[in-house]
Amino acid sequence: MTLSIIIALVGTIGGFALGFRQGKTAERAYQLSLSQAIPRIGSRVEIDTYHPSQRMDVTRYVIRTIIYNDGNLVASHVEGEWKLTASHGIHNTVETIRADSLPSELPIKHEHKLVGQFQQIYGSTDINVQVDIDLSYEGIKGTKEKYSTSYKYDAASRSMLQVKK
């Protein structure tokens, strides 16, 4: 009788330990899939040259921005501002960014041609060009999320580099 109680007790404890371990593994898998599913907005900003049609002797500049979602779930009600602050006669600009949804396979593409009385960006070391992106969106279960970042022009690399805000 005592032996059967001991065997039953050991079996119960072993079953509990095994179930607890499987539960922890399942919880980790759930947390990983949840973190991969949550909408995560990111961006890339590039500065490039272009030539107006029929004028190969004239060089102009354009800032191309891509706002994307790294998560598996769609970010909804995306809205905010794309703000350009610049020196050397480049016009400052604030533009509205708005999208009903932002799925992972369909990024928001934004293009802004620089306007103003300036000569060259690529040759100047003291020029200041900064893009600030501030967005709000609805994430999982309708929670309000925010995305905010800045990019500054780096003369040495001739590119826009992301900086901490």
Image: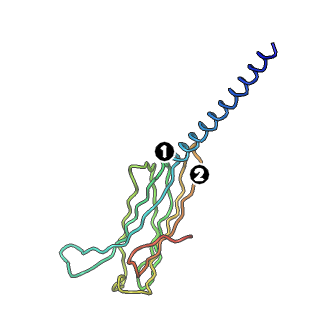
- What residue appears at the point 45 percent right and 60 percent down from the top-left corner? 97
Q: Quadrant of the C terminus?
A: bottom right
Crowding at mark 2 (Cα within 10 Å: few <14, some 14-19, many 20+): few
Query: Residue 144 — which label?
Result: 2
* In-front residue for pair 138/98: 138
Crowding at mark 1 (Cα within 10 Å: few <14, some 14-19, many 20+): some
Residue 30 spot, x, y in % from top left: 57, 39
Total number of numbered labels? 2
Q: How are the colours assigned in the image?
A: rainbow
Residue 102 spot, x, y in % from top left: 44, 50
Asked which quadrant contains residue 21, the reply is top right
- What residue appears at the point 48 percent right and 59 percent down from the top-left corner? 42
Residue 10 spot, x, y in % from top left: 74, 24
* In-front residue for pair 53/30: 30
- What residue appears at the point 36 percent right and 66 percent down from the top-left corner? 111
- The local secondary structure at tag 2 comes to strand
Residue 115 spot, x, y in % from top left: 36, 77
- What residue appears at the point 60 percent right and 38 percent down from the top-left corner? 25
Residue occupying the far front of the picture:
3
Residue occupying the far right of the picture:
2
> Can you say whether 154 is above or below 142 in the image?
below
Amino acid at circle 1: Leu
Q: Quadrant of the N terminus?
A: top right
- The local secondary structure at tag 1 comes to loop
* In-front residue for pair 36/57: 36
- Tell me which numbered mark, 1 or 2, is placed earlier along the sequence: 1
Circle 1 or circle 2, nearest the eye: 1
Query: Residue 126 — which label?
Result: none
Write down the residue under mark 1.
73
Residue occupying the far left of the picture:
54
Amino acid at circle 2: Lys
Please state if 31 lies on the left or on the right of 106 as rendered.
right
